[in-house]
Amino acid sequence: MRSDPTGAANLPPLLHRNPEPGIRIRKKKEPLEPEKTGKANGTLQKEAEYPNINWSNLEDPDVQKATILYNDRINTFREMVRLDKIIDQEPTKEIVKRLPELRIRNLLCFKELGTYNGTGKFLLEHPLIRHFSLRCELENMLVRNPDQFLEEYRNVANNVSRYRSYLNGDKADKKKADSWKQQLKKHQERENLMKDILTDQRHE
């Protein structure tokens, strides 16, 4: 019996602390611990870490989701390390905002994978698997028609900018502002999904 199906015991030490969004990642300078790679005891590391997931069964939609989460766990960690190297020299507003977002997303990867490994079910809190069918559609678009994918990506980015501008501009009534916030969230999630697909393609 597993006392912790979420996999929290496997989190890097840094990620155990200060889970609330918006809190600076470290109170003092500490190096981020690297993600484990390669093999552990002759077994691929993800198979050793999550032994109840049948990683070789790539036709299973749930295994596809688990693979997406595992890749995102690595990609978010890499980006955290990259930003961590420059934040003390160039602490821009964008980086200060981006690091906690990446950290929350990285934690969600651990949580989703640990829960699926322990219970056979996902929490569906991570945006990549919450929009799994949309991701498949966009991945197919990128393969079949890259120009269409890039045009869609530009349109989504423009929509994000437009709704941000609406919300940052003249004050509107609450009903209209709430509608703009919903539209902004929808387009941001689609934009992030497309960014992730492009990032995964570059790392292949």
Image (cartoon, rainbow, N blue to C red):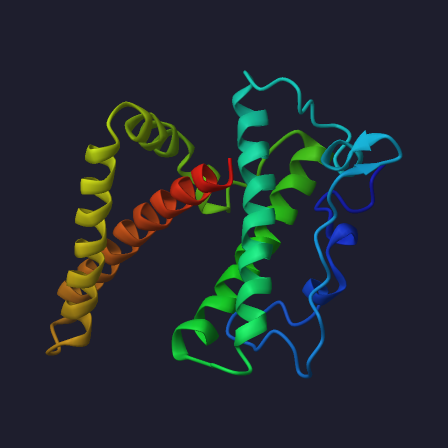
Q: Is residue 190 left or right of residue 100?
A: left
The answer to which image quadrant residue 177 occupies is: bottom left
Residue 164, given in percent of the width and then of the height, sits at 21, 66
Vertical arrangement, residue 7 with respect to residue 163, above or below = above
**Can you say which quadrant of the picture contains the N terminus?**
top right
Q: Is residue 155 left or right of residue 187?
A: left
Residue 126, given in percent of the width and then of the height, sits at 50, 46
Question: In terms of depth relative to the viewer, which is nearer, 7 or 88?
Answer: 88
For image coordinates 42% across by 33% down, the residue present is: 132
Residue 56, given in percent of the width and then of the height, sits at 66, 20
Q: Is residue 1 left or right of residue 128?
A: right
Question: In terms of depth relative to the viewer, which is nearer, 113 or 161?
Answer: 161
For image coordinates 62% across by 67% down, the residue present is: 19
For image coordinates 66% across by 29% down, the residue present is: 120
Q: Residue furthest right?
A: 41
Residue 124, given in percent of the width and then of the height, sits at 51, 40
Question: In terms of depth relative to the viewer, which is nearer, 157 or 10?
Answer: 157
Vertical arrangement, residue 39 with respect to residue 11, above or below = above
Vertical arrangement, residue 125 with respect to residue 52, above or below = below
Question: In terms of depth relative to the viewer, which is nearer, 150 or 17?
Answer: 150
The answer to which image quadrant residue 58 occupies is: top right
Q: Is residue 183 left or right of residue 111?
A: left
